[in-house]
Image: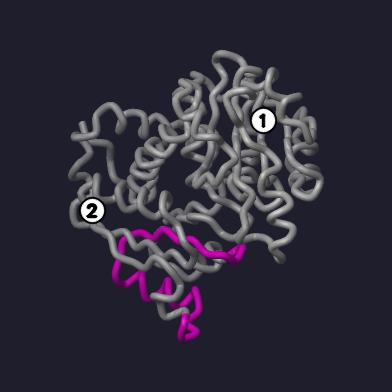
Amino acid sequence: MRHLLNPLDFSVEETDRLLDLAADIEQNLPKYSHVCDGRKLATLFYEPSTRTRLSFESAMLSLGGSVLGFSSANSSSATKGESVSDTIRMISCYADIAAMRHPKEGAALVASNAAKIPVINAGDGGHQHPTQTLTDLMTIRSLAGRLNNMTIGLCGDLKFGRTVHSLIDAMVRYPGIRFYLISPDELRIPGYIRQDVLEANHIEYKEVNNLDEAMPELDILYMTRVQKERFFNEEDYIRLKDCYILDRKKMKLAKENMFVLHPLPRVNEISTEVDDDPRAAYFRQAQYGVYVRMALIMTLLEVEKPC
């Protein structure tokens, strides 16, 4: 039995196979409509989510399975003091696979140690978000045609952004990757990512405060929102929330074949005027998330690809 807690739980070869399966699902969706008949997915979401939770549910329903679970800690026995370990033991009696989001880092690991079913980390605090990373990889590969030899700009909240941390972990395994890390000083990438991931893997990177400076160099621009829920005081959030706003003027600085990604939700860090630019890929990215999660569910449940 396997779990997905971290993007590195799958080797590069396994990741590529999963992305190949997701691409086949995209092209042949009806073929997969009954491969998980009779299987159940439990969605255990201890903090709010729209895209991730609904894309997991859409994925399982598209495979012919069914879904149960809760969408906030307030609607679970966590309000009565039940531990994550006890919850997953109980859920293991009801479902075949579980996707869990939790505000505490390491919660998915705790769950996996007690579970009798595969556990998927759907986001744990500011730590990891591996299924978003798989979605990002599919988006980049589908639009750019490769996952190597490119310059990626990561912009916004690089300190608390678990999607950013997971994407860096995954992308450093491909050759020729360079990063522009674009953030205010207060939201710079954590030291352990800089030292243990980037520098340990001899990855070229540049930390800058100015988005305009980086734009002409980028093949991918990955925007993130400044996350209000990760701040200890509202004053700091208000001071930093509008530090980067991508608009039509800034897009003129970019390459014609650069793509803009965003894990969503956005607040105002991408102007709506950018939505009509053919390089704006964030809504396509959300659709790719369904195909990736379908492929992941099949992989962890060891469901064979239909003929």
**Does residue 91 lie above or below 291 as drawn?**
below
Which residue is pictured at 69% across the width and 63% down the height? 234
Q: Which of 209/196 is in front?
A: 209
* Quadrant of the rendered image containing residue 117: bottom left
The amino acid marked with disc number 2 is: Gly
The quadrant in which the C terminus is found is: top left
Residue corresponding to mark 2: 65
Residue 102 x %, y %:
52, 64
Magenta-colored span: 79-106
Q: Earlier in the sequence, mark 1 or mark 2?
A: 2
Q: Give the colouring mode of the picture.
A: one colour
Residue corresponding to mark 1: 153
Q: Residues within 10 Å of mark 2 (few under 14, many from 20)?
A: some
Asked if residue 203 lies left or right of residue 61, the reply is: right
**Does residue 105 lie above or below 256 as drawn?**
below
Residue 99 x %, y %:
42, 58
